[in-house]
Amino acid sequence: MSNKTFTMPDSIYAYMIDVSLREPDVLVRLREETSRLSTSMMQIAPEQGQFMRLLVKALGIKRAIEVGVYTGYSSLSVALAMPEDGRIIACDVNKKWTDIARRYWKEAGVDHKIELKVAPALETLDTLIGEQLQDTFDFAFIDADKTRYKDYYDRVLTLVRPGGLIAIDNTLWTGSVADESNQTESTQAIREVNDLLHTDERVDISLLPIGDGLTLALKR
Ligand code: SAM
Ligand code: CA
């Protein structure tokens, strides 16, 4: 796993960040606090957060699902770009990390846009389907445990509307997916979802080499 775009030399990466990164103060502070945790590499790259803010604005996204919150960088990025009546259902199982997220959502004044569900994400997604919310979300971001990616994709594909966007994170998995000798459960699970998406006629796709690989799937 990597939390910066890994496909370019450091000097070019530094230049790219230098001439293009616009990171609101509250996100800078969240990134600094998270960097003190041993798990900080789980956070998305700042340039990816900026790209997601641009997507939210460009597509007028108002109803979103996030699978995998951690300390809240991606959900805060999405919430900041949404209008006042935007709403995110945010799924995670970890209270300690999401307590940090809640603190920053509040500080940024967007906590009213984010409904945190501290429970296994599959349960939350199945509940939403049970509540007849299929075809109602504009956007979903999948970034939790990789071995369940296929199940998350299956559920969010039901929940987003035709024309809605699904973003799946870590689809390049620091290159491990292309290394035949790497057969860890997570690597195999990501390969499987990449293969599934490649031929899935229900969506249009693009795999972007941003961060650790971000696949966009637009529901037909
Ligand atoms: N999107 C986050 C960000 O921008 O900082 C990073 C998410 S991190 C890679 C993955 C998260 O998935 C962790 O916070 C972990 O607690 C959560 N997670 C793991 N298994 C889960 C499950 N079964 N249901 C919901 N969340 C889960
Ligand atoms: Ca990720």
Image (cartoon, rainbow, N blue to C red):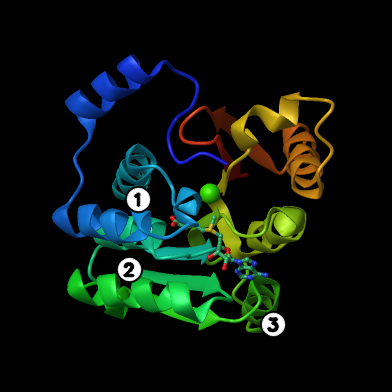
Question: Which quadrant would the C terminus be assigned to in this image?
Answer: top right
Q: Residue at x 53, y 67 (%)?
A: 136
Occupied quadrant, residue 13: top left
Tell me the distance, in whole angstroms, between the alpha carbons under discs 1 and 3: 26 Å
Q: Is mark 1 within 8 Å of ligand 1?
A: no
Q: Is residue 10 left or right of residue 24?
A: right
Q: Nearest the camera: 185 or 136?
A: 185
Q: Residue at x 47, y 65 (%)?
A: 70
Q: Is residue 46 among the parts visible in the rendering?
A: yes
Report crowding for label 3: few under 14, some 14 to 19, many 20 or more residues within 10 A (C-alpha).
Answer: few
Q: Is residue 136 left or right of residue 97?
A: right
Occupied quadrant, residue 55: top left
Q: Earlier in the sequence, mark 2 or mark 1?
A: 1
Q: Is residue 211 left or right of residue 81?
A: right
Q: In this picture, is 186 found above or below 171? A: below
Residue type of the residue flagged with mark 2: Gly
Residue under circle 3?
130
Residue 176 percent coordinates (x, y): 70, 31
Q: Are marks 2 and 3 in contact (CB under 8 Å)?
A: no
Q: Nearest the camera: 22 or 129?
A: 22
Q: Are marks 2 and 1 in contact (CB under 8 Å)?
A: yes
Q: Nearest the camera: 209 or 84?
A: 209
Question: Which quadrant would the N terminus be assigned to in this image?
Answer: top right
Residue 181 percent coordinates (x, y): 84, 27
Q: Nearest the camera: 184 or 139?
A: 184
Q: Are marks 1 and 3 in contact (CB under 8 Å)?
A: no
Q: Is mark 2 within 8 Å of ligand 1?
A: no
Residue under circle 2?
86
